[in-house]
């Protein structure tokens, strides 16, 4: 081979190898499109001068990577002095809400006045570090039997069944329940019972104010008198309230076969489906929808607030697509907000409404959107009166049925 030909061959070989391996910092032109960045890393840096280095700090929030609001599933690492830190991946432009705990909801970050702070909010628009300073930590009472409660309540403890952790329930009784002994009442079963009546037991220090709202509306003849049963959640909340999982189906059985028979046996209820409702928000919203959809012979009404109908691994829209609509009359009150996590839930809600109306020709529902609403107890409390008016309109005759 001539010298010129050898040199040409060597240059071509070097050029080809350069294309394959890249040179310096340049990117290979053969890099697959599948390697395109699909997530941003968010570093959460918490400064808390009041804590000791051995303190256990957790982050929890509105997505799977944040533990779906489980207070002790995503620990931060102690870095130095008063700093704890963790880096987590989020989908590009994913919005999320979060809080910090010390392992449960009894202690949370507070402002300098000692008031528990609302949810923090973030957006994964780029790789970045979010720095939060904890002025102080507020301890909440863990006494289930105290707090600001309007009306008469009764507590019952230690309920469980196969696959379901033990928990307590709270029963709120309508005005005059203990006076008119001939009267029976519809029943509303609420998930996340800690959060509906008593701010002292609520996960975030703010309750749904179901007791105050119900009392005012009943006294003003704006709604029917009902019994409200709050079923406390457990550390398995995210799986127990997911109807697409086995444990979610076990939770339904637990409510139907353990909780409801107990209530019907110990209180003056109207046990038929037409007088029995179920309600909740977020995971409690999807569970409430599912219980009416799957068991219309037990429940005929549902309060479905900010439901997680299709998000992350959850897809109850497909379940409804592949099943028949209830054969007996049922009604859904569905609502959601428009800020933060509520935006993330919107597409699943839109898909479900389309399946209901177009595929099933189902129109027995009301959908309300509060574009300024957030994913919080305070917002659900604000929308509660319209749900009560729709599902429990005032009736003239409320005697035994």
Image (tube, helix red, strand yellow):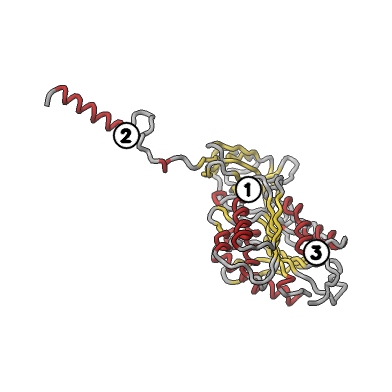
Q: Give the foreground label among 3 and 1.
A: 3
Q: State the SS at label 2.
A: helix
Q: Where is residue 157 in the image (x, y as percent from the top left)?
A: 69, 69
Q: Position of residue 62 (x, y in %)?
A: 61, 50
Residue 144 sits in quarter: bottom right
Residue 392 sits in quarter: bottom right
The CA distance from mark 3 to mark 1 is: 31 Å
**Total of numbered circles in the picture?**
3
The CA distance from mark 2 to mark 3 is: 72 Å
| Residue toward you, 60 or 261 | 261
The image quadrant where one finds the C terminus is: bottom right
The CA distance from mark 1 to mark 2 is: 43 Å
In this rendering, position of residue 306 left or right of residue 43? right
Residue at image coords 69%, 72%: 260
Q: Which mark is residue 393?
A: 3
Q: Is residue 144 positioned above or below 41 on the image?
A: below
Q: Nearer the N terminus, badge 3 or badge 1?
A: 1
Mark 1 vs 2: CB contact within 8 A: no
In this rendering, position of residue 362 left or right of residue 91? right
Reading the image, the residue beneath label 2 is: 21
| Residue toward you, 320 or 134 | 320
Reading the image, the residue beneath label 1 is: 341
Assess disc 2: are there few (<14), some (14-19) or many (≥20) residues with their C-alpha within 10 Å of its C-alpha. few
């Amino acid at each position: 081979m001539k010298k010129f030909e050898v040199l040409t061959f060597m240059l071509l070989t070097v050029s080809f190898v350069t294309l394959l391996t890249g040179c310096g910092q340049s990117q290979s032109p053969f890099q697959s499109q599948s390697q395109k960045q699909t997530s941003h890393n968010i570093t959460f840096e918490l400064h808390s001068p009041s804590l000791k280095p051995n303190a256990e700090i957790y982050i929890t929030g509105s997505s799977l990577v944040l533990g779906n609001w489980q207070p002790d599933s995503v620990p931060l690492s102690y870095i130095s002095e008063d700093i704890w830190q963790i880096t987590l991946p989020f989908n590009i432009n994913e919005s999320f809400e979060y809080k910090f705990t010390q392992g449960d909801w009894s202690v949370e970050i507070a402002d300098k006045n000692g008031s528990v702070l609302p949810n923090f909010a973030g957006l994964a628009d780029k790789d970045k570090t979010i720095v939060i300073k904890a002025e102080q930590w507020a301890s909440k009472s863990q006494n289930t039997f105290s707090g600001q409660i309007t009306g008469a309540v009764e507590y019952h403890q230690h309920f469980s069944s196969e696959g379901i952790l033990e928990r307590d329930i709270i029963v709120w009784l309508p005005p005059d329940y203990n006076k008119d002994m001939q009267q029976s009442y519809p029943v509303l079963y609420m998930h996340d019972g800690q959060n509906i009546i008593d701010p002292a037991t609520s996960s975030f220090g703010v309750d749904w104010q179901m007791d105050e709202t119900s009392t005012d509306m009943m006294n003003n003849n704006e709604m029917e008198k009902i019994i409200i049963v709050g079923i406390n959640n457990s550390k398995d909340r995210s799986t127990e309230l997911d109807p697409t999982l086995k444990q979610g189906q076990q939770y339904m059985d637990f409510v139907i076969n353990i909780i409801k028979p107990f209530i019907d046996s110990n209180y003056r209820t109207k046990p038929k489906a037409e007088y029995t409702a179920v309600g909740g928000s977020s995971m409690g919203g999807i569970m409430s929808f599912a219980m009416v959809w799957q068991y219309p012979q037990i429940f005929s009404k549902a309060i479905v607030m900010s439901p997680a109908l299709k998000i992350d691994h959850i897809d109850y829209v497909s379940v409804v697509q592949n099943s028949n609509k209830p054969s007996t009359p049922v009604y859904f009150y569905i609502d959601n907000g428009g800020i933060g996590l509520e935006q993330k839930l919107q597409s699943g809600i839109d898909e479900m409404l389309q399946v209901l109306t177009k595929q099933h020709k189902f129109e027995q529902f009301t959908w309300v959107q509060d574009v300024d609403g957030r994913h919080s107890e305070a917002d659900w409390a604000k929308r509660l009166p319209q749900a009560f008016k729709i599902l429990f309109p005032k009736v003239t005759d409320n005697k035994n049925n």
